[in-house]
Amino acid sequence: MIFSTKPDDIAAEIIELHAQESGRRGNWESHWQEVKDRVYPSTADFISYTTPGIKKNLEVYDSTAGTALNRFAAIMDSYLTPRNQTWHRVMSPIEELNKNREAKLYYEDVTKILFRYRYLPISNFASQNMMYNKSLGAFGSSSQYIDSAGSEPGIRYKTCHLGETYFIENHQGIVNELLREFKLTGRQAIQKWGDKLPDGLEDKIKTDQGREFCFVHYVGPRRDVDPERADFKGMPWVSHYVISEPRAYIEEGGYNTFPYTPSRYEQSPNEIYGRGPAMDVLPMIKTANEIKKTYLKQGHRAVDPVILVHDDGILDTLSLKPGHATAGGVNKDGRALVHTLPVGNINAGIEMLNEERKIINDNFLVTLFQILTETPTMSATEVLERTREKGFLLAPTMGRQESERLGPMIEREIDILSQQGLLPPMPEVVKEAGAQFKVEYDSPLSRSQRAEEAAGLMRTVESTLGVVNITGNPAPLDHFNWDVIIPDLADINAVPSRWRFGIDQVQALRQSRAEQQQQQQMLEAAPSIASVAKTVS
């Protein structure tokens, strides 16, 4: 938290805080750099600045980890935020209010508007989300800046490189302060701040617009919130921009909601930053690289072997060109006088490499999602059981992203759209209830966690059918409320609502079917009735 009030003092305090946080995470940056070199070479460095366009994959011999990271990011995207589904709903925290038609329609409209603006091309959410997940898988921590789209209505997302963001936790272990160090050319700084730049600094930047300058953005809780004010002084989050060299204060602002979404994949006690799958299996990644390096050497020797010849001057004309006849390669009895140097057991290297690859893929969740594709003949019950197991395995890690990232992200999105006047008018019944909202997730992750119910149902139904087959009495099936079970099963299995009939349509179909059966019975009974009538007459 920044305690100074004068601009120059604020700038000095932020620069000092940045230096402290930078010094505290030296071990982290060294660790991240190792992961970056071997798993995610295309991203920026942590320790030193590299020239744009330089080759970055010089440490990579085996691409298993890099490929697994891409698949991990895709898994996170499809399991938490699938772009072809409505993976969350906005609701009221008051259950009775969710039954009110006016309030229900309002929250449904808010949900639709959120998804519409989130996936607009200008928002850039899809690409930034992939970068976010890759940082999470490689380094265990990630952060995204969410703000308005500028001159156009909507939201803009930007995933920040971990090397330029610094997390600061409060006493409850929640990241409520963040420093972001970034570079802009003089031209870009003028585009961003214009007349807000200090006089002396503006002149210096204008004279060298191509030079890069280092800026620091600080966001944290505001100590002196004035709720009576409508400007940034009345906002709970304070924003300060400063320039490192020359040290100067640039701009103060504010936010109603925290604009960054820092999250950790998994976190060790007494550590601020997280640890990701790549960090957990870094020894295996290094081993796989060394095995692959040795395997390449062995393979090179096997394809283009070292030739062993007797030093008697006979084979001076030895050539490896195709079709060349070499005199003296065999003796008069036909025994070869030329041999190749043995290269060792190449298959052993392949087995060792496959073992390391399996561990790497397991940790990146790749093998977990190969179950259904490798065994396509599974029954519905087996599929539900496997889905349930996935939910158990993924809940501790992916579930954290719902609370630490997606919840604050949705809150920030609603705040931005509300300020831009893009949300529908709030009904009085919602205002009277405090204008609060909660998020209910409907992603594949949340459905897999509910698969326990479906798996339990299928096991019970199978057992019940066994009893019915033995006794010949269908009465045990009367215990199941199929009108409730079938829609819930469809929700768990992600069947779109537009593919299903509502309860009114189902009842209409049943009534129509009953009328058709009644007519059929009457037609079938007509000859008998006619015969009886004829007999009576």
Image (cartoon, rainbow, N blue to C red):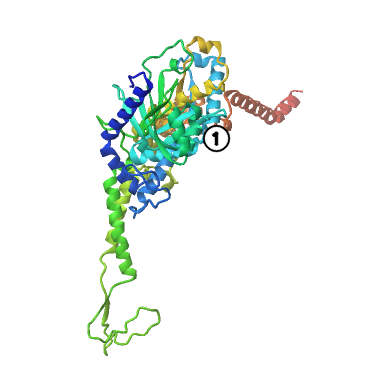
Q: Which residue is mark 1?
A: 122
Residue 510 is drawn in which quadrant? top right
Observer able to see residue 380: no
Residue at figure coordinates x 27%, y 38% from the top left:
26
Where does the C terminus fall, quadrant-wise? top right
Quadrant assignment for the N terminus: top left
Which residue is painted at 28% across and 50% down in the image? 286
Disc 1 marks a residue whose amino acid type is Ile
Q: Which quadrant of the structure image shows residue 501?
A: top right
Q: Nearer the viewer, residue 198 or 225?
A: 198
| Depicted 234 relative to depicted 272: above or below | above
Query: Which quarter of the figure has residue 179?
Result: top left
Is label 1 in a helix, a strand or a loop? Answer: loop
Q: Is residue 73 visible?
A: yes
The image position of residue 235, as x and y in percent, is: 44, 17
At 41% from the left edge and 18% from the top edge, which residue is drawn? 236
